[in-house]
Amino acid sequence: MKKIFCFIITVLALFSCDSRLDEYQRLIPKDDSIPAPKPIEIKNVKPIPGGAVIKVSYPEDNNVRGTVAVYERNGEIVNTKISRYVDSLVIEGYPDENDHEVKLYSFNVNEEKSEVVSTVIKPLTPPIKTVRPTMTPTFGGVKILITGNEVKADFAVCLLRDEDLADEGKPVSDMKWVEVTTLFTSSNNINLSRRGLNPVEALFAVYIRDHWGNVSDTTVVKLTPIEEYKIDHSKFRDASLDDDNCKSSSASYPLEGLWDDSGASVAGHFFASDTSPRPCWLTIDLGLTAQLSRIHTLPRIDYMIWSSAHPRVFEFWGWVGEDKPRGTYNALNPHGFQDGWVLLGEFEQIKPSGYEEDGSVGTVTAEDRAYFNAGNDFEFDTDLYPHANDPITHLRVVFVDNFSTYGTEAETMSIQFGEVTPYGIVITE
C-alpha cells in the first residue's frame, strides 16, 4: 500500500507541472474506447502585459486530462498546455496590444480534443514597448540605463558599434554595425556597463530583445568612452596607519589579498574578525599619484552570497595631503580622520532584483548571483562628491555595514572581501 501511495503522489507531481505533461501521458496507456472529452468553460480573461491569463473550469468528465490553448504569435502557431489540476492558462509573448484569438480545447489521455471554445484577448502594453535603454559614455566604455521594465521581464540588451562617423544619419539597416556585447537582465532602473573600449568617438546602437524574439526600436548615439586605465596593483602597499581598525584575522587572509589578482578565490581574499568595530577601515598606499574614475570590487566569490560578512555599504576616501597620512585622530572630521582625507564616494552593493522594503535581502535570483560574483563598479561622481577626482596617493576603504549588521545596532562586525581595483589616470609615479 505504501508503494502504491508513493506512485500516485509521484504521478500527481508530474501531472501538475506543465512542462512534464508528456511524461505523464506516457505513464497511462491509451484506451481507444474512451469518448472525446467534453469542452471546458472559460470563466475569466484577465489581460496582462503582452498577453492574458485565461481561467477555465472543467466539465464533469473523468476522461479530461487538461486544457490546451492554440493561438498564433509572430506568425507561428503556439500550443500552451495545463493539466486539469490547474485552472489558469498564461498566454504571453505578444509585442502589441491588438486583439488575438485563442482557441481552447480539453483533451483526454489519447490526446483527442474536445470541441473548440474560442476567446479574444487584448494584451496590455508589452514590456518590449515600455522598456527604455539610455546610453551615456563612462570610464572605459559605455553605460546603458534600463528603465520601463516594471514587470521585470527577461531581456537581452544588444550593444553595437560603427566606427565610421560618416554613417551618422543613415538608416540603421545601412550602417556598418559590429556587435560589441549582449547583456542580460530582468531588472528595472539598472545600469549595465561595457568596459574595455578605446576612448575613440564612434556611433553606438542598442536594442532590446525579449524571450520570444520580439525586438524594440534601436537607439543610436554618438559618444566617446572616457579614457581610464587599471591602476598598477604591483605598486600597492599596506599603509598600516595608526587609526586603521580593520585588521587581518590571520596570515592566511592578509590585506595584500585585496590586490593580489587572485580573482577572489578562497585562498586569496581578505578577512577581518567579528571583533572589528563598526564601521571599520583600512588604508592602501597606491605607490603613485592618480585621479580615480571608479573602483571595481570583487567579493569572496560564490560563498555565502548576499549575507554574512560580505560588505554591503562602502565609503572610499582619498589622501590629498602634501605629506603621507599618519592616522592622526581629528574629532571634527567624519570617523575622526585627520585633515587631508577627502570623500570620493559612498555606495551600496547593488542587487539587480532589488532589496525588500524593510531593507532585507529577500529572494536571490540567478541574475543576482551572477551579478554578485562578477563584482561591482563604483563610479565616482563629482556632482555628488566634489573631491571625487582629486589626485590622491592613498586609498582608504571604509566598511560601513556588512549584510549581517545592516539595519541593526551592532557595534562590531566581520569583513570578508575579495579584491579592490582602482581605475583612472596616473599623474605621477
Image: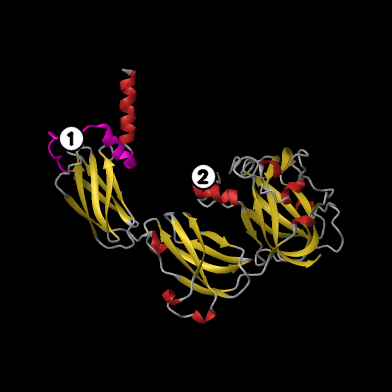
Q: Dividing the picture into quarters, in which one does residue 85 lie? A: top left
The residue that mark 1 highlights is 63
Residue 364: x percent and y percent?
51, 44
Residue 64 in the figure: left or right of residue 348: left
Residue 160 in the figure: left or right of residue 127: right
Q: Which numbered disc, 1 or 2, marks the residue that appears first in the sequence?
A: 1
Assign the C terminus to one quadrant of the image.
Answer: bottom right
Residue situated furthest top in the rendering:
1
Q: CA distance from mark 1 to mark 2?
A: 41 Å
Residue 289: x percent and y percent?
79, 64
Q: Secondary structure at mark 2?
A: loop
Rendered image coloring scheme: secondary structure
Q: Dividing the picture into quarters, in which one does residue 73 lie? A: bottom left
Query: In front here: 15 or 22?
Result: 22
Residue 415 in the figure: left or right of residue 110: right
Of the two numbered discs 1 and 2 in the rendering, the one whose residue sits closer to the viewer: 1
The residue that mark 2 highlights is 364
Residue at (76%, 56%) from the top-left corner? 395
Q: Amino acid at mark 1?
A: Asn
**Vertical arrangement, residue 169 with respect to residue 56, above or below:** below
- Give yes or no for residue 158 being in the magenta stretch: no
Residue at (46%, 59%) from the top-left corner? 156
**Vertical arrangement, residue 181 with respect to residue 300, above or below:** below
Residue 370 seen from this side: yes
Q: Which residues are magenta?
A: 17-39
